[in-house]
Image (spheres, rainbow, N blue to C red):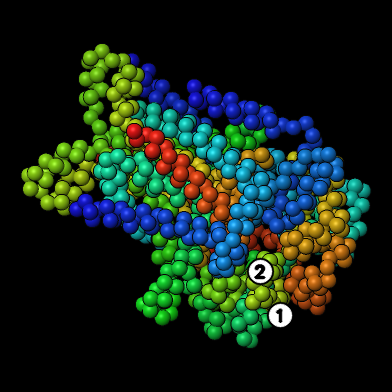
Amino acid sequence: MSRALALTAAAVLAFLHLPLAVLTVFSFNASRFTVWEGFSFKWYAALAQDTRLIEGAWNSLLIAAAATIFATAAGTLCAYGLWKRRAPLLTGTLYLSLVTPEIVTGVSLLAFYQFLFRYLDIRLGMHTVILAHVTFSVAFVVVVVLARLRTMDATLEEAAMDLGATEWGAFFRVTLPALLPAVAASALLVFTLSFDDYVITSLVAGVDSETLPMVIYAMARRGVNPAVNAISALIVVGLGFFILAAERLREP
Amino acid sequence: MKRRHLLAAFASLAACRRSLKPRLNVFNWSDYAARDTVPAFERRHGVELRYAVYESNEEMLAKVFSGNSGWDIVFPASSLIGPMRENGLLSPIDRSQLPNLANLDPRFRHPPWDPQLEWCVPYMWGASGILYTRKLNPPPRRWADLWDPRLGGRITMLDDPPDAIGAALKKLGFPLNSTNPAELDAARAELLKQKPLVRAYLNAEARDQVVSGDLLAAQMWATTARQAMDAAPHLAFAYPEEGFSLYADCAVVLKESRRHELAHRFMNYLLEPETAAAVVTECLTATANAAAQRLLPPSLRDDPVLYPSPEVMNRGEWLQALPPAAQRLRDRIWTIVKSS
Amino acid sequence: MWTKVRFWTLAPSRLLMGLLFAAPLCIVAAYSLLTRGAYGGQSPPWTFESYARLLDPLYAAILFRSLWIAALSTALCLLLGFPLALFISRSAKRKNLYLQLVMLPFWTSFLVRTYAWMFLLRDTGLINTILQSLGLIREPLPLLYNEWAVVVGLVYGYLPFMVLPLFATLERIDPNLLEAAADLGARDTDTLFRIIVPLAMPGIVAGCVLVFIPCLGAYLTPDLLGGGKSMMAGNLVQNQFTNARDWPFGSAASLTLMAMVMLALAWLARRQKGDLL
């Protein structure tokens, strides 16, 4: 069983990483099309000069980091509250946000922002993108965290409170530690959703908040662009090393 | 604590970005500026230019429709000038600030979508036709060749209703901008007949697969085709005999802009022959600027794909904005074609 | 005391969802009752016409195709995601590493990944080339531009949405429980279906919901991997907001779709005795 399981898991991971291998290989292709014409570093050289891509990547990282922190915090608290007692209206709204097609979320938010901007002196920018990302990802956090809470024993908290813990104390000392894997998983999900979002972002982004997916779409909507492959490969390899290093540090 | 740090970082970042130089925000198609187009303007006038790009009219329109997008200049296709003006999105052009308008090709001085150039300045233009591999013998010459079973499963049509429906209309000898339900219905039947032969409805993504040989022919925009041919000499492009669509991407100043003077200075700069010629040389596009065309190296100036002969051009028809009823009928036809 | 805690746990989400989701959605609801202007945009008169247009059988066909493709993709996601999540939840030390490996591909652009799939699946692509050079096939298989390619793309694109909630619940299962079952002579399949699956049910439901819903609204995958030949609900909505510039109809179509999915979810929640969320 466990060997079969490991093999299946390896196969699924391979399925997930196959396209990465392909785009990494093509980032070294001399041709600008997906026809192999020899090895070349020229797309990486082109990348180093492209300030738009670098600025976009930086914007995306900032937005994703902020969205992850806010959405994970709000979503975890919300899941906890909903676990304790039902709140049909909020639950319904959260589900509704999950079933809303991206373009509708984007268009409606843009219309709403524009309406607000008539009365307030603000413009589209990083803040509007972050707020949009937090909004569309809270429901994901709630679903993932709540799925874990459902498997947990509610009496544990009661026991803690019988022993004198306050409500918040019970939450922070007893429930939250047991929730951490789900919180981490949902944070990972939010970061990824935010980092990769194009439809909503392109609608609510301002003049100065071009994100990486926006730059990439503009560069690659006409077909494969090896420079885009190159930056994708760099991000994956870079983050991969970061993950491995972090893992090393955690293990004594 | 962490959160506060992050907020502080954001605030300082936002503050840094506010520079004191006057700034112009320009939203243009990708591939419509040379590497030095923007920096040279910034240097010359001591201003800052925020230049970003988009890939479809709809993407740009969704943003500027609300009238509070932050952009000063955008480049809609000619068929959108009317609708954008009707919706109060455009600010009139002040021709006295654009002496370089004299450089425009006569064809673009009184274009059908804006005869007196009151609202827009034509920048680049293009057409749709057939990109094919030279292996194909005989080569496609007409839209009807894309209905040839010989090419079965190895062609693509554009995923763009005006162009795909337009090709069917032209094949039948009807006008490109037809609003006649009977003609449109005939076009629908043509497209459904063609569908089994069509591998996919794709836009520029088809380019890669014509290069690799998966596809023998694809309906494609001339400029995109020309860029592909530059890197893959085994490709060729045909302007179909039945006629084809033409469009022009034009610079407009948005009504929301508060920098009209600077916006005009930038448009005038784009109209300089040297500026436009540099863009064409680097990006392989077709400029509406006759003076710039004269500056091009002969190989580009006489390129039959970018600048077809007057006889070919006579077959072209400008895409127009259509009345709502026709637009809705076309949308329904497109939905039927794509979902059958 | 609890009411106070409850207030503060729910307040941020209430504020966020009310202000930045529900209020904007009301604008879209208003759009759906307006009329498309002559050149796009929306204006009075107020009318239900956009909803009436949806009664066209054409749109029912699109809906059924979308439901079928989304359901198939969700099932495949579960089939692939469950073993992976189980494996990760059981690996003692490397949990985080594996989890991050699952997410790693998704830190590249969706568009770029889709192009990679186009290369893998096309006639002159990697899979066909390998099969041909091995002599297994003569003519390239038509892998790209059909509904199967769409399913592959969707499964690939939304697998993490399945794996993460599954992992979050599977990880809770006490290994001692499984050992005890084995000690009592339970076979692996018994343990799996009688103990693990029932305990992981909240995660399975959450994962299926998280995958099914975005599959229904997907539009780039059907366009690029399906070749735009079999329109799905997501494409219909997207087209109305972009190409057709008919926002009232796009709003009506999306609200109707959302209402149907919500009804299905409510039904599911009732069957689960309100435990869905």
Q: Quadrant of residue A170?
A: top left
- Residue at the front extreme of this rendering: A252
Q: Residue at x 22, y 41 (%)?
A: C199
What is the x, y in percent for residue A220?
Answer: 60, 57
Badge 1 sits on which subunit? B
Viewer-proximal residue among C79 and C236: C79
Q: In which quarter of the image is residue B272?
A: bottom right
What is the x, y in percent for residue B209?
Answer: 56, 70
Viewer-proximal residue among B334 and A113: A113
Determine whether label 1 and label 2 are within 8 Å by CB: no
Residue B334 visible in this rendered orientation of the protein: no
Type of residue at label 2?
A: Ala
Residue indicated by mark 2? B231
Type of residue at label 1?
A: Glu
Q: Residue at x 46, y 49 (%)?
A: C106
Vertical relation: B38 (above or below) A251: below
What is the x, y in percent for residue C138?
Answer: 41, 81
Badge 2 sits on which subunit? B
| Left or right placement of residue B190 versus residue C213 in this view | right
| Left or right placement of residue B243 versus residue B195 in this view | right
Which label number is shown at residue B241?
A: 1
Considering the numbered disc 2 on the image, is that residue within a helix, a strand or a loop?
Answer: helix
- Residue at the left extreme of this rendering: C184
Viewer-proximal residue among A50 and A128: A50
Instruction: Report crowding for label 1: few under 14, some 14 to 19, many 20 or more residues within 10 A (C-alpha).
Output: some
Q: Quadrant of residue C9?
A: top left
Distance from the alpha carbon under mark 1 to that under mark 2: 26 Å
Instruction: Report crowding for label 2: few under 14, some 14 to 19, many 20 or more residues within 10 A (C-alpha).
Output: few
Q: Which residue is drawn at 35% across and 59% down?
A: C72
Residue A63 visible in this rendered orientation of the protein: yes
Q: Which residue is drawn at 90% across and 47% down?
A: B97
